């Protein structure tokens, strides 16, 4: 009888549950948000610097940035 209980308890621990998958998805989503905000600032600064360099060269064919 004791071995049957042990098998039943062990059988419940196999594989991940929906809660664990949900936590994993939430952690990945949070990481993506942090990376997008960090890289977004860097990309925005790069585009602004490029636009300012183009404006300072005085090219008449350049449109708005």
Image (cartoon, grey):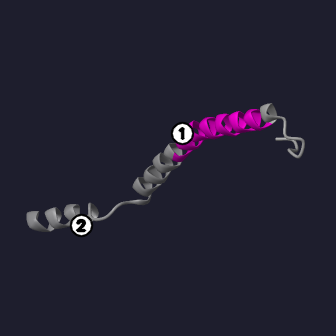
Q: Which residue is mark 1?
A: 34
Query: In which image quadrant can residue 14 be found?
Result: bottom left
Is 55 left or right of 20, judged from the image as shown? right
The front one of 49 and 29 is 49
In the rendered structure, does residue 36 fall within the stretch colored magenta? yes
Quarter in which the N terminus is drawn: bottom left
The front one of 50 and 6 is 50
The front one of 41 and 58 is 58
Q: Position of residue 65 (x, y in %)?
A: 82, 41
Is 65 left or right of 4, judged from the image as shown? right
Q: Dot 1, crowdedness within 10 Å: few (<14), some or many (≥20)?
A: few
* Mark 1 or 2, nearer chain start: 2
Q: Which residue is mark 2?
A: 11
Mark 1, secondary structure of its residue: helix
Q: Dot 2, crowdedness within 10 Å: few (<14), some or many (≥20)?
A: few
Q: Position of residue 41 (x, y in %)?
A: 63, 35
- The image shows a total of numbered marks equal to 2
Q: Which residues are magenta?
A: 32-54
Which residue lies at the image location 60% right of the left edge and 36% below the top edge?
42
Magenta span: chief secondary structure: helix
In the rendered structure, does residue 55 fall within the stretch colored magenta? no
Q: Position of residue 47 (x, y in %)?
A: 70, 40
Q: Position of residue 63 (x, y in %)?
A: 88, 44
Query: In which image quadrant can residue 5 be found?
Result: bottom left
Marks 1 and 2: which is nearer the front? 1
Mark 2, secondary structure of its residue: helix
């Amino acid at each position: 009888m004791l071995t049957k209980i042990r098998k039943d308890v062990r059988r419940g621990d196999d594989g991940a549950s929906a809660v664990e998958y949900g936590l994993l998805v939430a952690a990945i989503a949070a990481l993506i948000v942090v990376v997008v905000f960090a890289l977004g600032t860097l990309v925005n600064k790069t585009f602004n610097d490029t636009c300012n360099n183009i404006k300072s060269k005085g090219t008449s064919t350049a449109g708005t940035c």
